[in-house]
Image (spheres, helix red, strand yellow):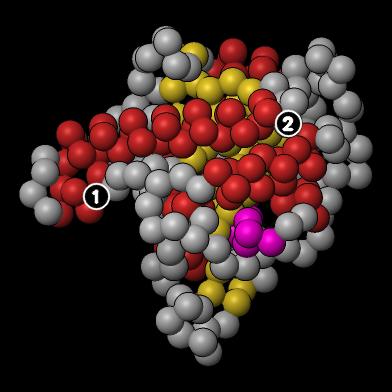
Amino acid sequence: MTRGSRPIGGQGRKVPDPKLKYKRVLLKISGEALMGDRGYGIDPATVEYMAVEVEKIIKMGVQVAIVIGGGNIFRGVEASVKGMERASADYMGMLATVINALALQNALERIGLQTRVQSAIEMRELAETYIRRKAVRHLEKGRIVIFAAGTGNPYFTTDTAAALRAMEVGADVICKGTKVDGVYTADPMKHPGAKKFDAISYIDVLKNNLKVMDATAISLCMDNNLPIVVFNIKKADNIKNLIMGRKIGTRVG
């Protein structure tokens, strides 16, 4: 599959402007991003805001796939540190991502966007089972596809799931939405003097142990030359401006 040369059709789908930098994107959102100002769970107003931001790029003709984490509900790694068996903890974390996916689907559909949730763990009453060719067809028809339950395997994070799904559906870029406006030399919340990178290589991310995505996800992107853009998802229009090629966040590649 060649990036940037996919058919568009069906559902009154708008053909993307050829000037857009990216025409098919994988948006990675952390579970924590859905909490808003709460300490736990899902904040409806925040989910609605995310849906509106996605709508902006859908209207531009961009094909959108989404992977959401589950850290606002349950984090498998933290549970395993406290004594729970890692595989069981990770499966519980995967179920948390399904809850988040359904919440976002509801918000997107309430503003008139067609959405499909595909789960790596079969649960027919709630979501489609993940099938790559079906996911691609949904994207071609202008539907938003939300990939839930990670890779379906324990010991792999939703970062790795995002990298894997992005490559499987032929995305042009992974847009990683965070609470900061890019990649810094250190955590800017804890170190005010930390410097931001406009661009950085995969190797430098790995070498300096920068917390962009986990090492497996970064290595996967590096092996397949898939760029990652880290940006502040809480700032309105950021994802829209990113798609248009404006300098937003940090590009890893």
Badge 2 element = loop
Q: Which residue is denoted by mark 1 in the rendering?
A: 77
Q: Nearer the viewer, residue 162 or 78?
A: 78
Amino acid type of the residue tagged 1 in the rendering? Val
- Residue beneath the point at 57% across and 82% down: 195
Q: Which residue is mark 2?
A: 111
In the rendered view, tell whether residue 215 sits above or below residue 3: below
The span shown in magenta is 226-235
Quarter of the image with the N terminus in it = top right
Q: How many marks?
A: 2
Question: From where the camera sits, is residue 96 visible?
Answer: yes
Residue 171 x %, y %: 65, 35
Count neighbours of disc 1 (C-alpha within 10 A) and say few if under 14, some if 14 to 19, many if 20 or more: some
Question: Which image quadrant for residue 110?
Answer: top right
For this orientation, the residue located farthest to the bottom is: 193
Q: Secondary structure at mark 1?
A: helix
Indicate whether 196 appears above or below 60. below
Residue 204, horizontal then vertical, whole percent: 49, 68
Between tags 1 and 2, which lies in front? Answer: 2
